[in-house]
């Protein structure tokens, strides 16, 4: 059962009521439950806020168990700077899904773990040649990877400005999710 559907059942909140609270149609929520549609990033954020974090980005954008395994490369600075490949794949999938026009198939699910690995490698390589750090360097690594995926799978690739915003959104999603995870792990 989809985590949002489970949440609504446990909270005894009707789908129509929840849909109104998050500014979505009931049909949109049913498509999300069935896996036919992923929520757009803004809707995902509203769902997470409306559920008080009980439904997470991971839950809304979870991938199938048979996805490709990722080799996580550590940066030269050690484990503290290592990027989480699974979280990167989720952030990239959210952004690519959002940028895929209605009616187009878009990138296959298997492309996202590979893209995450490319971002990790680019991020590690940039540590030796750029002064950018933190989210700025992650955005710098995300942009060309997102661009290549969308050029490969979409009939009409997005503009440079759209790609810049996409990299920023993917970075924001990644940083938000990893901060939440770190906060949860320090509480346990």
Image (tube, rainbow, N blue to C red):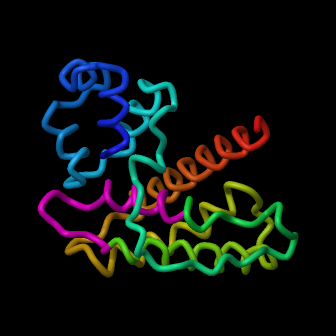
Residue 87: quadrant of the picture: bottom right
Residue 72 position (above or below residue 170): below
Q: Residue visible at 22% across and 37% down?
A: 29
Specify whether 71 is left or right of 56. right
Residue 40 position (above or below residue 93): above
Q: Residue visible at 61% across and 70% down?
A: 141
Magenta segment boundaries in residue numbering: 88-108
Residue 83 position (above or below residue 154): above
- As drawn, the residue found furthest toward the right would be 77
Q: Nearer the viewer, residue 67 or 152?
A: 67
Q: Residue visible at 23% across and 71% down?
A: 156
Residue 37 image position (x, y, % from top left): 23, 52
Residue 39 image position (x, y, % from top left): 31, 45
Marker count (numbered): 0
Q: Nearer the viewer, residue 137 or 93?
A: 93
Residue 153 position (above or below residue 20): below
Query: Is residue 83 a member of the stretch shown in magenta?
Result: no
Quadrant, the C terminus = top right
Specify whether 43 is left or right of 177. left
Residue 134 image position (x, y, % from top left): 74, 56
């Amino acid at each position: 059962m989809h985590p949002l559907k489970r949440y609504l059942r446990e909270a005894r909140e009707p789908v129509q009521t929840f849909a109104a609270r998050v500014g979505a149609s009931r049909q949109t929520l049913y498509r999300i439950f069935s896996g036919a549609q992923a929520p757009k990033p803004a809707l995902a954020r509203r769902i997470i806020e409306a559920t008080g974090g009980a439904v997470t980005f991971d839950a809304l954008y979870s991938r199938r168990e048979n996805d490709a395994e990722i080799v996580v490369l550590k940066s030269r600075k050690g484990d503290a700077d290592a990027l989480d490949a699974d979280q990167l794949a989720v952030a990239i999938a959210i952004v690519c899904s959002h940028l895929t026009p209605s009616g187009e198939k878009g990138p296959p699910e298997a492309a996202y773990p590979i893209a995450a690995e490319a971002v990790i490698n680019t991020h590690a390589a940039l540590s030796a040649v750029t002064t950018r750090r933190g989210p700025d360097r992650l955005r710098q690594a995300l942009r060309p990877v997102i661009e290549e995926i969308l050029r490969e799978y979409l009939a009409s690739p997005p503009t440079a400005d759209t790609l810049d915003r996409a990299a920023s959104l993917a970075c924001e999603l990644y940083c938000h999710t990893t901060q939440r995870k770190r906060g949860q792990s320090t509480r346990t």
